[in-house]
Image (spheres, rainbow, N blue to C red):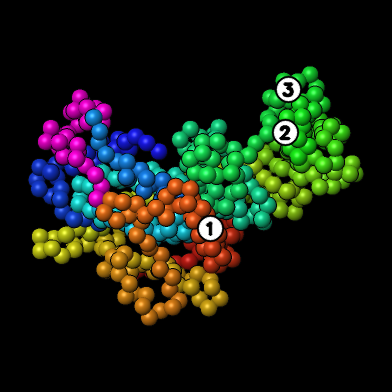
Amino acid sequence: MTGSAALFTDRYELTMVDAALLDGTAHRESLFEAFARRLPDGRRYGIVAGTGRLLELIERFRFEDAELEFLREHRVVRDETLDWLADYRFRGDVWGYREGEAYFPGSPLVTIQASFAEAVMLETVVLSVLNYDSSVASAAARMVSVALGRPIAEMGSRRTNEASAVAAARAAYIAGFDATSNLEAGRTWGIPTMGTAAHAFTLLHDSEEAAFRAQVEAMGPGTTLLIDTYDIPTGVETAVRVAGTGLGAVRIDSGDLPTVVAAVREQLDELGAVNTRITVTSDLDEFTLAALSGAPVDAYGVGTSVVTGSGFPAAGMVYKLVARRGDDGEWVSVAKSSTKKLSVGGRKNAARRIDSTRTAREELVFVGDGPDGEEEFADDDQLRPLMVRLMHEGRADAAFTGHAGVEAARAHRAEVMQELPIEAFRLGRGEPVIPTTYR
């Protein structure tokens, strides 16, 4: 990615900096924390996603001539503040949960330690990334859990904006999806891409058979033929006749799926295409995937529901100042006490209690020495530390960015799923599967 990310923010962040520079508080060392007060209604766990994207955006968060001229023209801040912004670089530290980690209410997902002015300006970019990406990943993880090992492709680009489409593909892949239809996601993040033909290709030709022959000639008999443009049984017969019994797959995008899939499987077997796979793509979500668990489906393609968080397009995360240095140099805990918007002040660390069966039982948030403290875990081998340093003195740890960061997050998510109690994978409404305890 190139270009400045500095205006991916809200105006009030700059005006706060303007006022804080004027009264001398801008340079107070501060600790901001991104967390969720609650999970989306009925969800039992969430999945952290977007961290690698966020780190790259923070490194690009700087005010160049074009950004400064816009701010000057619209008189957003004083000229003295524009001079300060011209030299702005984030030089602080970032700690947080690894991308792909499960999270619960109160989990300190990202902690940013820097001067107030450096850290407060990151609020919007932090939340816009984590709220969307984690929402997609959390929904995608639920879909993966009910797919029972069958491959799932993300194909929702046309149901969101162009930038979100790339972010959604990345988040879904981290959550266990196998591929995306979005080529930019493939180029930027190294995600496998897939796709063959839509109904328009069939309608372009004089007959379904002519369309199938053209596709097989271009892509080989291992391709996937879309069989529901007209009559599905006729489409199956034509597909096998054109491609032979070595036809790779057929795709179904409509109908009463359990009934249709069973009939198609039976017809394929009768025609000798016993190894031809069946892919289903038809407004799927985690509930329809679960309903198809007993059907002879080989793969799924999911669009709208995954890129919209399956009804929860934002994860509900907030970014709050939780501690600042006092005049004596000591840390001072600060927190909101507003009705229904309470937060817990203080520098924090976190761990997950894992029992002898390797099952997670409790999320522990330690208030005190902050994310670089380790004494909380020294004598307890059942605690798995959750927070890692993501950025030091303004430089991101390369292990969490780029293609390598995506693959590491995907692998970590798979490991974390093995720890969650079985109740986590129920689709019915419920409370978080493990409690969060502050100490």
Dividing the picture into quadrants, the one containing residue 252 is top right
Q: Residues within 10 Å of mark 2 (few under 14, many from 20)?
A: few
Identify the mark nearer the N-term, 1 or 3. Answer: 3
Identify the mark nearer the N-term, 3 or 2. Answer: 3
Q: Badge 3 is on which residue?
A: 203
Q: Badge 2 is on which residue?
A: 219
Q: Is residue 216 left or right of residue 2?
A: right
Decide: is 290 above or below 358: above
Observer able to see residue 101: yes
Q: Mark 3 is on which residue type?
A: Leu
Dividing the picture into quadrants, the one containing residue 3 is top left
Q: What stretch is highlighted in magenta?
A: 66-91
Under circle 3, the secondary element is helix
Asked whether the beta carbons under mark 1 and mark 3 sit within 8 Å of each other, the answer is: no
| Residue at x-position 74% and y-position 48% | 297
| x and y percentages locating residue 166 in the rendered image | 49, 39
Q: Badge 1 is on which residue?
A: 411
Comparing 130 with 167, the one in front is 167
Assign the magenta stretch its main secondary structure: helix
Q: In this view, does 382 lie to the left or right of 32?
A: right
Q: Mark 1 is on which residue type?
A: Ala
Q: Is residue 10 left or right of residue 307?
A: left
Observer able to see residue 47: no
Q: Residues within 10 Å of mark 3 (few under 14, many from 20)?
A: few
Comparing 324 with 190, the one in front is 190
Is 82 magenta? The answer is yes
Is 379 magenta? The answer is no
| Residue at x-position 40% and y-position 68% | 385
| x and y percentages locating residue 371 in the rendered image | 31, 64
